[in-house]
Amino acid sequence: MDTAEGSFRLREGGYGVVPIGMPHRLRNDSELAVRWAEMQAPMPRSAYQDDTFLVSGPAYQEAADVDVRDPRNRYFGRITPSQMDATKQSQDLLEVTASMRTALLVYGGINVKMMVDSDLGAQLATMFMVHYDPDGATGPHDHPFEETYFFLEGRAEATFDGKPVLLGPGDIAWAGVGCPHSFRNLGGGPLRWLETQAPQPPRRYSYRFARDWDYLREVLG
């Protein structure tokens, strides 16, 4: 990726954010095909060329590998399978400095690794990797933002607005604002997907679990 700040080589597991108005160019300098998942937020406007304009530059430069530990690195990161392993989170094993974006959040058989968020310079969207252990599950909940899910490994039993669906590698799902959804790992191995959110979650009240409101209904009689 060529940018005004230099040219950077993104390899398997690499990710990044392109802020609004930042000139950039993607090119494949290898002999193999390159594929990546990409999301845009907010939704591009058709009246403005889908918010993509051809501009001059940046100049071609020799691409440098992204050094995720260099504090001057502002837009790129890298994720590996070991970063989703809860047993490999000690400081000496982490590939990058531990922070809310780089540390692994573990709860109830679910591991979450933040990738793109405000720490990386994103203002309108987030992206992270989700890993469910064989017994991982989460109950129905909804959000004040939209989510997309790109399934990479394993099989999931999910519900969206109370409707069950089976999801596996290559499947894509979407939950709109206020759509109750849940997930459960169906297989004997791990379940993994790439997840995006737009706009970015608020600092509070980003999750609303149905069980809490069901409990309140019971308390009120």
Image: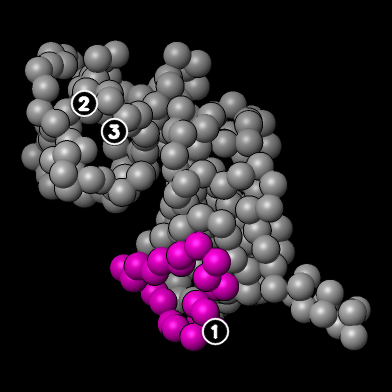
Amino acid of disc 1: Gly
Residue placed under numbered mark 2 in the picture: 24
Does residue 197 appear left or right of residue 104 in this picture? left
Report helix, strand or loop for mark 2.
strand
Disc number for residue 162: 1
Q: Is residue 83 visible?
A: no
Dots 1, 2 in contact, CB < 8 A: no
Q: Which of the two labelled residues, at mark 3 and mark 2, occupies the earlier sequence position?
A: 3
Image position of 161 with respect to 24: above or below = below
- Single out the mark in the foreground, 1 or 3: 1
Report helix, strand or loop for mark 3.
loop
Q: Which of the two labelled residues, at mark 1 and mark 2, occupies the earlier sequence position?
A: 2
Amino acid of disc 3: Leu
Amino acid of disc 2: His
Q: Residue furthest front?
A: 47
Disc number for residue 10: 3
Does residue 134 appear left or right of residue 145 in this picture? right
| CA–CA distance in space, label 3 to label 2 | 14 Å
Dots 1, 3 in contact, CB < 8 A: no
Report helix, strand or loop for mark 1.
loop
Name the image quarter holding residue 108. bottom right
Taking depth in this image into account, of 173 and 184 the one nearest to the observer is: 173
Name the image quarter holding residue 210. bottom right
Pick the quarter of the image with the C terminus: bottom right
Q: How is the protein colored in the picture?
A: one colour
Estimate the x, y position of residue 74 in percent, counting from the top left: 43, 21
Q: Which residues are magenta?
A: 157-181
Estimate the x, y position of residue 28 in percent, counting from the top left: 13, 35
Estimate the x, y position of residue 194 in percent, counting from the top left: 43, 56
